[in-house]
Image (spheres, rainbow, N blue to C red):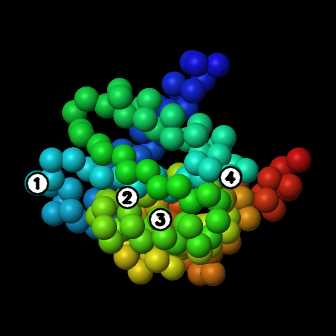
Amino acid sequence: MKKIKITIGILVALIIITSIILFISEGRITGESIIGKEKIKIGILIPLTGSNAAIGEDIRNSILLALEEIKNIEIEPIIEDSKCKPAEGVTGIKKLIEFDDVSAIVGITCSGVANAVSPIIEENKVPTILSVASSYQPEKEKNFIFKLWPSDKERANNR
């Protein structure tokens, strides 16, 4: 079980780093927002309390474990608890963007939270990776939001 968590953590870290590199190359993150900073701040918005806390804890632990393996880039994870509630997610995302000045956000796990925060993410142009938000459906094509988990409809069609 520990090997699986380490592998998942390393994969998450690689996805984060690869995404940041892609976002820079596509101009979604400017070099100035990364270069010259001692640390790259990555926001993590996950449920740490409430009925989905176990999922959030696994995501947090995997990311933190993977970040221990990264030697050449200093990444500072900033974690906010969404409680899997849209209002809490909005509060957390605003803090991560406006106060913490993160370069990217990962970990959003609840579709209600994803739907509530997506306009804020797009407005502020912060690259974001949704971990598990299966019923999240963007109103239009999003330029800064990426899903790792298939939608409920996609999963149903593959059974």
Mark pair 4, 1: CA separation: 38 Å
Q: Residue at x 58, y 19 (%)?
A: 2
Q: Which mark is residue 50?
A: 4
Between 35 and 61, the residue placed more toward the observer is: 61
Which amino acid is tagged 3?
Gly
Q: Secondary structure at mark 1?
A: loop
The residue that mark 1 highlights is 36
Q: Secondary structure at mark 3?
A: helix
Q: Position of residue 59 (x, y in %)?
A: 55, 41
For disc 1, the neighbor class at 10 Å (few under 14, some 14 to 19, many from 20) is few
The residue that mark 2 highlights is 104
Instruction: Give the vertical position of 95 relative to 37 (above or below).
Output: below
Mark pair 1, 2: CA separation: 16 Å
| Tag nearer the camera, 3 or 2 | 3
The mark that comes first in sequence, 1 or 3, is: 1
Between 134 and 113, the residue placed more toward the observer is: 113
| Tag nearer the camera, 3 or 4 | 4
Residue 29 seen in this snapshot: no
The residue that mark 3 highlights is 92
Instruction: Give the vertical position of 159 relative to 25 (above or below).
Output: above
